[in-house]
Amino acid sequence: MTVTAHSGAFGTPDNSVEFIKKVLEEHCDIIEMDVTFRPDGTPVIIHSGSPNPTEGILLRDAFSLIAADPDIKMNLDLKSVKNLPAVDELLDRYGLTERAFYTGVGADWAPVVKENSKVPYYLNADVALWNRSSENALAKLADKIASLGAVGVNTHYANCRPAMVKAFHDKRMPVSVWTVNDGKNAAKYVSMGVDNITSRRPDVVTAARDAVADADNQATTA
């Protein structure tokens, strides 16, 4: 199971150079950045879907920092799909193509992402309360997400139940949840078998992951 450092993790400003440097310093599994485009199509990191011509940190500057770490992966949380080929070009330039994937992709954006980028993507999905434990409804959701070309599902942790993890794992698709910031919930979702947890406190989630693994190992050897 991986742990993703949410933009602004460790109390740093969202989508900042300080944030990127801190995540690299902490050797996190995955770094999440909000990706969008200025009016001229220049890719930047900022939460806004329509920044002005001077807003946001250039994506090329973020990639330049991240490329120095040979291991960390990138969750590029799309806030716009205006100029995806420019993102692909930068990923190729910095040798990061194999380490990137998209989130923030809904059913309406999936065809655009598939047509304009070679980067794999998770589909963001909500699940109605009455369907969160329905094996039939969750299997249909997994099939729909697969049909849209996504590699897995990305959802708020409140949507996720053991039945969801099972339904997607039965289709060999990973389940990623956001945004878990406390140890109790982290342990709950680690034990549930999710494949990734996104957090502003990746240190807390990592500790919970390790504690659950230690407990499982002790139970196995007892």
Image (cartoon, grey):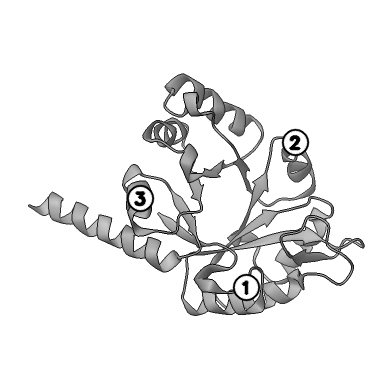
Q: Within 10 Å of the Cα at label 1, are there few (<14), some (14-19), or many (20+) other Cα atoms?
A: few
The percent position of residue 41, horizontal first and vertical second, equals 88, 61
Q: Could you give the CA–CA distance between mark 3 and mark 1, rounded to whole angstroms?
A: 27 Å
What residue lies at 79% left-to-right and 42% top-to-bottom?
Answer: 112
Q: Is the C-beta separation of discs 3 and 1 under 8 Å?
A: no
Q: Mark 2 — residue? A: 108
Q: Secondary structure at mark 2?
A: loop
Q: Within 10 Å of the Cα at label 2, are there few (<14), some (14-19), or many (20+) other Cα atoms?
A: few
Quadrant position of the N terminus in the picture: bottom left
Front-most of residues 200 and 104:
200
Q: Could you give the CA–CA distance between mark 3 and mark 2, rounded to whole angstroms?
A: 30 Å
Q: Mark 1 — residue? A: 13
The percent position of residue 136, horizontal first and vertical second, equals 47, 19
Q: Of the residues under marks 1 and 2, which one precedes in the sequence?
A: 1
Q: Mark 3 — residue? A: 190
Q: Is residue 218 above or below residue 194?
A: below
Q: Is residue 208 above or below residue 145?
A: below
Q: Secondary structure at mark 3?
A: helix
What residue lies at 43% left-to-right and 23% top-to-bottom?
Answer: 135
Q: Amino acid at mark 1?
A: Pro
Q: Give residue 124's quadrant in the image.
A: top right
Q: Is the C-beta separation of discs 3 and 2 under 8 Å?
A: no
The percent position of residue 55, horizontal first and vertical second, equals 82, 70
Q: Amino acid at mark 3?
A: Val
The percent position of residue 163, horizontal first and vertical second, equals 39, 31
Numbered marks: total: 3
Q: Amino acid at mark 2?
A: Asp
Q: Give residue 122's quadrant in the image.
A: top right
**Along the horizontal axis of the image, is 40 left or right of 76?**
right
Instruction: For marks 3 and 1, give the one nearer the viewer.
Output: 1
